[in-house]
Image (cartoon, rainbow, N blue to C red):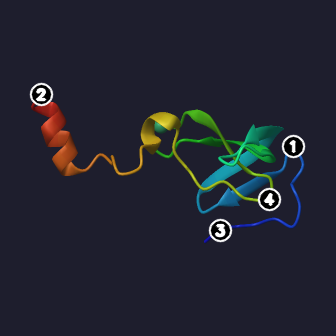
Amino acid sequence: MRIVFDQQPEVGFGISIGRHAYMIVQHDQRTNRHGDEVQVSIWRGRCAECGAAFDQYTRMDFAPESCRCAEHKRPGKRATMTNTVSEGAR
Ligand SMILES: [Zn+2]
């Protein structure tokens, strides 16, 4: 379920989602797919796989969703048993 804020939380704002804690470290702007400048929040969290700190950005009024660093995120490429076997067989 999406957590949505009424307004953009301040830098330093922290939130816990499940067992994962995130904190806003910066406000920034990004260009969305329509070419519009949008205000975003940069969140810092720790990867559920390796524990490394990583940053992710969300729309200004959205809470973070990812709980993995860029290296472990890879949607659809989870380390399933099948993947592990095929990679080890290379
Ligand atoms: Zn990781």
Q: Are marks 3 and 2 in contact (CB under 8 Å)?
A: no
For discs 1 and 4, the disc positioned in front in the rendered view: 4
Q: Earlier in the sequence, mark 1 or mark 4?
A: 1
Q: Which mark is residue 90?
A: 2
Q: Amino acid at mark 4?
A: Asp
Q: Quadrant of residue 35?
A: top right
Q: Quadrant of residue 30?
A: top right
x, y percent for residue 21: 67, 51
Residue depicted at 66% across the width and 54% down the height: 64
Q: Is residue 29 above or below residue 16?
A: above
Q: Quadrant of residue 42?
A: top right
Q: Amino acid at mark 2?
A: Arg
Q: Are marks 2 and 4 in contact (CB under 8 Å)?
A: no
x, y percent for residue 45: 64, 43
Judge by depth and name the residue closer to the eye, 36 or 79.
36
x, y percent for residue 12: 85, 44
Q: Which mark is residue 11?
A: 1
Residue that numbered label 3 is attached to? 2
Residue that numbered label 4 is attached to? 61
10 Å neighbourhood of mark 4: few (<14), some, or many (≥20)? some
Q: Of helix, strand and loop, which one carries label 1?
A: loop
Q: Earlier in the sequence, mark 1 or mark 3?
A: 3
Q: Which mark is residue 88?
A: none
Judge by depth and name the residue closer to the eye, 1 or 59.
59
Residue depicted at 15% across the width and 32% down the height: 88
Give the position of the N terminus as an image quadrant: bottom right
Q: Of helix, strand and loop, which one carries label 2?
A: loop
